């Protein structure tokens, strides 16, 4: 019988010696620039941000708890600070195609200057044009033109009037136009007097009137042409005056922007547009140019990098299609939707142009068309602003179609590992566009050197969160808690989010205690308070066990009954809970029924564990014969799903107890998985499982030699709470490491397990001998039962025959 010693207190918890921390408080430490233990990640980030070839965008993988976005952003901001600021981008009115605004690329800071210059140009149009049209010179020249055309019009009519007078005919102007009437002695004849004239005289008058009427008609037909000529002369005058008024400002602008050919072309087009719309710019008397016309000359500074220090680093927390590629706003005017160049809005891809864009992969995939929009931009290298309504063909109204804007941006997606693998498998474009995989380490090595690096990281967290400095005891306690979070005495968690939360809460309790520094007591209180806040269900579970509602035995010995251990995860909080596992055994055909599986409460991994232990039993006790066994295993009072193989050691022991009839000690609980050779394998949540059974035993008032059997491979994963360590040190609670099923059976039964001798038999009075003998008895009963069945079957056949 193996002599298995329980673990010592130093084996169930690895302390951090304060002597290894060479400082008084974290104020004396230099902040840590880079995260601890993330060398692989940092190397991938350096490579991904350094290479500029197409498709080398990054996908940062990591567990959800790690503050991935903040770490990636800090790295990119440090790198971007040494890179040049990207250019400004503007949209301006396209005078040749009004529905297609033009994109202008300018040096950083020039966008503001161009906008300011064009605002000044607009103000010059607003005030200068009005002043020109109100000047005496303009009024005088306008009057001269109008007088000239008035004289030309009157000259033709006057000649007709004189000819009519000489012929005794009057040219009369009426509201309806001009008319001709005969005169006598300077007076217009009345109709009755005209009728008294001789026929030959009337005929002569009518012939002359017809002749004059024809000339009058010709003269009147010249009036529209004269008016058109008048308008042309006035327009030429207006253009001349506007060019005179704006000639100086336009020349100054062109001289100032001579280094930007695109701006010069825009200024030339703007000047031509001003000339073409000189009459409209004049506006109504006293009202000045219309604002709608002036807005055409305004510059929409879409991306302003005037104050940028290095390349931009943009994090878009709502990555919808519009927020990524931009959108065009509309206003309601006179019952209709209206838009112009000034209503074009930039997206994250515009703002990150020339730099880095950080996106949460899950959020991108949850918004319609966002993922497809990113892929299109990365493939094409330019951004097209288009609404979802137009993309889906839901609207057919005309709108602006801004010129596509070229972009050079490094996209950094941040997400869980599962998302990365799913995209790599199902999206053929993914690996073509995101060639760099940057994977966060879940934990880091715990060593003396890393203790100091971890202390510097905690110092950085304290400064960023404006928390009081930590003394050595607080840092040591935080390092120990980091090992607990990593479930490993030789590791430290890389989840700085949880550490930051604990640190801030410890700072709060330090402030409450009027302490200038955070000590280990404040850290411990922060940890305890977090557990209390999240521990309602844990407390309810303990209460149910204490009242006997959920049956868990912690004393005595019982056949076919054992205490298994499981872990319940609720958000960031998890706790261990013991569960009663029972088994039955009878003669059969080598079948072990997993009741959880039969009722569809057991998961595939749990079912796999049951199949493995059944094959272990068959290979050990019936290696050369048929296993005659019909067994069943169940988690009692389990009404939810059960999965995982961490209970397979307990299930194996309880099934063997049911077969052999040997009782199991109920003051011990068991966790661990089993392989087909009976070796015990490591499981997760080992500290919580130990603490779960410890709490139940303490609640029952029975803490005298109680304990837990754990896989020997899990010893270095133990980081139990202070109460457990105290009980272990006093010998009141024991944690036994086991390597195989036999060691577990010896602890649970007090019997030697026994090994096969050269004849293939187990020693007398050993546990395995009792199992083997009972299975032989099962086989004998099964053969006898089959023999009776065969005999009955033959007799019936003869009788019926």
Image (spheres, grey):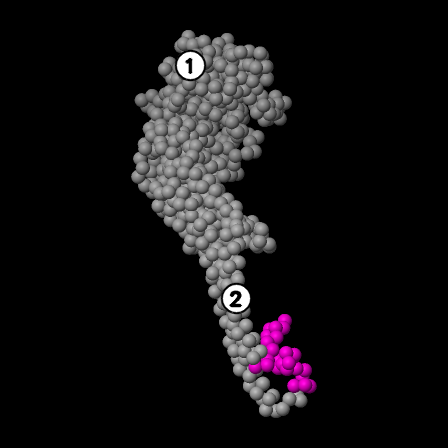
Q: In the rendered image of this protein, does residue 785 appear above or below residue 42? A: below
Residue at point 58%, 23% (across, down): 533
Residue visible at 41% across and 51% down? Answer: 269
Label 2 residue SS: helix
Residue 200 magenta: no
In the rendered image, the residue lying farthest to the front is: 185
Mark 2, residue position: 151
| Residue name at image x 48 percent, y 42 percent | 120
Q: Where is residue 728 shown, x and y percent of the image?
A: 49, 12
Is-magenta flag for residue 183?
yes
Q: Is residue 765 visible?
A: no
Q: Mark 2: give few (<14), some (14-19) or many (20+) Cα within 10 Å.
A: few
Label 1: which secondary element: loop
> What span is in magenta?
167-194
Q: Is residue 511 above or below residue 307?
A: above
| Residue 188 appears left or right of 416 | right
Residue 592: % across, % down: 46, 34
Front of the two marks 1 and 2: 2
Foreground of the two, 123 or 142: 142
List the residue tagged with mark 1: 29
């Amino acid at each position: 019988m193996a002599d298995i010693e329980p673990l010592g207190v130093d084996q169930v918890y690895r302390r951090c010696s304060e002597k290894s921390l060479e400082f008084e408080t974290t104020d004396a430490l230099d902040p840590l620039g880079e995260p601890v233990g993330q060398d692989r990640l940092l190397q991938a980030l350096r490579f991904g941000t350094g290479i500029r070839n197409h498709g080398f965008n990054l996908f940062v993988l990591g567990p959800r708890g790690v503050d991935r976005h903040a770490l990636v952003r800090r790295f990119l901001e440090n790198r971007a600070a040494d890179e040049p600021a990207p250019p400004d981008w503007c949209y301006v009115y396209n005078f040749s195609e009004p529905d297609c605004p033009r994109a202008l690329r300018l040096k950083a800071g020039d966008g503001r200057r161009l906008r300011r210059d064009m605002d000044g140009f607009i103000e010059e149009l607003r005030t200068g044009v009005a002043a020109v049209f109100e000047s005496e010179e303009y009024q005088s020249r306008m009057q001269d033109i109008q007088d000239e055309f008035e004289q030309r019009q009157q000259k033709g009519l006057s000649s007709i009037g004189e000819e009519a007078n000489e012929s005794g005919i009057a040219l009369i102007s009426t509201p309806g136009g001009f008319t001709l009437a005969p005169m006598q002695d300077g007076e217009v004849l009345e109709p009755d007097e005209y009728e008294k004239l001789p026929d030959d005289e009337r005929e002569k008058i009518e012939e002359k009137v017809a002749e004059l009427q024809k000339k009058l008609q010709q003269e009147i037909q010249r009036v529209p042409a004269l008016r058109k000529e008048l308008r042309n002369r006035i327009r030429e005058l207006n253009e001349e005056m506007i060019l005179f008024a704006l000639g100086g400002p336009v020349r100054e602008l062109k001289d100032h922007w001579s280094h930007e050919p695109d701006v010069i072309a825009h200024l030339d087009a703007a000047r031509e547009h001003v000339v073409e719309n000189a009459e409209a710019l004049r506006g109504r008397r006293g009202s000045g140019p219309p604002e709608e016309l002036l807005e055409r000359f305004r510059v929409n500074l879409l991306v302003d990098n005037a104050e940028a220090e290095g390349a931009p680093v943009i994090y878009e927390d709502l990555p919808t299609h519009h927020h990524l590629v931009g959108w065009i706003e509309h206003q309601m005017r006179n019952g209709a939707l209206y838009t112009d160049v000034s209503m074009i809005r930039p997206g994250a891809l515009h703002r990150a142009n020339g730099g880095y864009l950080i996106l949460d992969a899950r959020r991108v995939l949850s918004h319609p068309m966002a993922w497809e929009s990113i892929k299109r931009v990365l493939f094409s290298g330019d951004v097209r602003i288009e609404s979802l309504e137009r993309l889906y063909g839901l609207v057919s109204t005309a709108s602006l179609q801004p010129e596509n804007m070229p972009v050079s941006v490094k996209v950094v997606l941040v997400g869980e590992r599962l998302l990365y693998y799913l995209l790599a498998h199902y999206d053929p474009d993914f690996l073509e566009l995101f060639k760099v995989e940057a994977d966060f380490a879940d934990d880091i090595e715990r060593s003396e050197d890393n203790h100091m690096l971890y202390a510097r990281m905690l110092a950085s967290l304290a400064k960023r969160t404006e928390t009081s400095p930590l003394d050595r005891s607080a840092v040591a306690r935080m390092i120990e808690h980091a090992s607990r979070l990593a479930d490993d005495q030789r590791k430290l968690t890389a989840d700085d989010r949880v550490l930051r939360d604990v640190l801030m809460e410890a700072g709060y309790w330090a402030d409450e205690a009027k302490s200038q520094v955070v000590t280990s007591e404040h850290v411990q209180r922060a940890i305890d308070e977090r557990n209390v806040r999240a521990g309602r269900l844990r407390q309810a579970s303990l209460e149910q066990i204490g009242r006997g509602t959920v049956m868990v035995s912690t004393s005595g010995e019982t056949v076919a009954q054992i205490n298994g251990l499981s872990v319940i995860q609720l958000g960031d909080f998890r706790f261990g809970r013991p569960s009663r596992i029972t088994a039955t055994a009878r003669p059969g055909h080598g079948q072990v029924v997993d009741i959880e599986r039969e009722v569809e409460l057991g998961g595939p991994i749990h079912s796999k564990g049951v199949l493995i232990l059944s094959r272990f039993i068959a290979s050990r006790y019936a290696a050369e014969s048929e296993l005659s066994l019909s067994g069943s295993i169940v988690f009692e009072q389990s009404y939810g799903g059960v999965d995982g193989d961490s209970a397979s050691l307990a299930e194996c022991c309880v099934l063997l107890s049911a077969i052999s009839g040997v009782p199991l000690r109920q003051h011990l609980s068991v966790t661990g998985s089993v392989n087909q050779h009976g070796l015990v394998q490591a499981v997760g949540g080992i500290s919580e499982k130990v603490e779960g059974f410890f709490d139940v035993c303490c609640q029952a008032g029975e803490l005298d030699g109680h304990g837990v059997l754990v896989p020997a491979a899990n010893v270095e994963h133990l980081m139990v709470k202070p109460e457990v360590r105290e009980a272990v040190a006093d010998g009141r609670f024991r944690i036994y490491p086991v390597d195989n099923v036999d060691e577990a059976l010896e602890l649970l039964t007090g019997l030697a397990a026994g090994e096969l001798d050269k004849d293939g038999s187990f020693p007398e009075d050993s546990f395995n001998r009792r199992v083997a003998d009972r299975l032989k008895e099962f086989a004998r009963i099964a053969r006898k039962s089959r023999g009776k069945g065969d005999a009955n079957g033959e007799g019936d056949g003869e009788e019926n025959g």
